[in-house]
Image: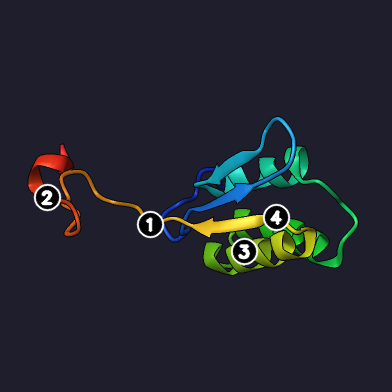
Amino acid sequence: MCWNTSSAFTPVGFALRGPASRKIVWTLGDAARLLINDWPCDDGEEYVAAVKACVDALSGKIAPEQFREALLRAADEAGIAALSLVRQGVGERRPDLPSSAQR
């Protein structure tokens, strides 16, 4: 299993309840830990589907992005807010900021 697969995985942030209220999922390993350790309920259909999809993605049976879609459906089912994140490469400039603010 490839726990740190991230090449085709668009990162996503989650707003959970409790002390571990904010989590960013960068890799399949992060997602597995989130589902097992921090998910607020473990009895929903979409949750079970996301756990299975995570195992399938870790073992290479499905693409990481297919798993990500299952994870987002599980978050919706559990009432967890999710936010897609965009990776910005080192040295990239954001066009909406003046050059002096980009350092």
Question: In the image, is residue 60 above or below residue 88?
Answer: below
Task: Report, in whole angstroms, how far the alpha carbon at label 2 lies from the one at label 4.
Answer: 35 Å
Q: Which mark is residue 86?
A: 1
Task: Report, in whole angstroms, how far the alpha carbon at label 3 lies from the one at label 2.
Answer: 37 Å
The earlier-in-sequence mark between 4 and 3 is 3
In this rendering, does residue 1 appear at all? no
Q: Which mark is residue 67?
A: 3
For the residues bearing labels 2 and 4, Cβ distance under 8 angstroms: no
Quadrant of residue 18 in the image?
A: top right
In percent of the image, x 79 and y 66: which residue is there? Answer: 46
Q: Secondary structure at mark 3?
A: helix
Q: Nearer the viewer, mark 3 or mark 2?
A: 2
The earlier-in-sequence mark between 3 and 2 is 3
Task: Report, in whole angstroms, how far the alpha carbon at label 4 lies from the one at label 1.
Answer: 19 Å
The earlier-in-sequence mark between 2 and 1 is 1
The earlier-in-sequence mark between 2 and 4 is 4
Q: In the shown orientation, is residue 97 left or right of residue 6?
A: left
Front-lying residue, 27 or 14: 14
Residue assigned mark 2: 98
- Badge 4 crowding class, 10 Å Cα cut-off, few under 14, some 14 to 19, many 20 or more, is some
Residue type pointed to by label 4: Ile
Residue type pointed to by label 2: Pro
Task: Report, in whole angstroms, how far the alpha carbon at label 1 lies from the one at label 3.
Answer: 18 Å
Q: Which mark is residue 80?
A: 4
Q: In the shown orientation, is residue 23 left or right of residue 18?
A: left
Residue type pointed to by label 3: Phe
For the residues bearing labels 2 and 1, Cβ distance under 8 angstroms: no
In percent of the image, x 46 and y 59: which residue is there? Answer: 10
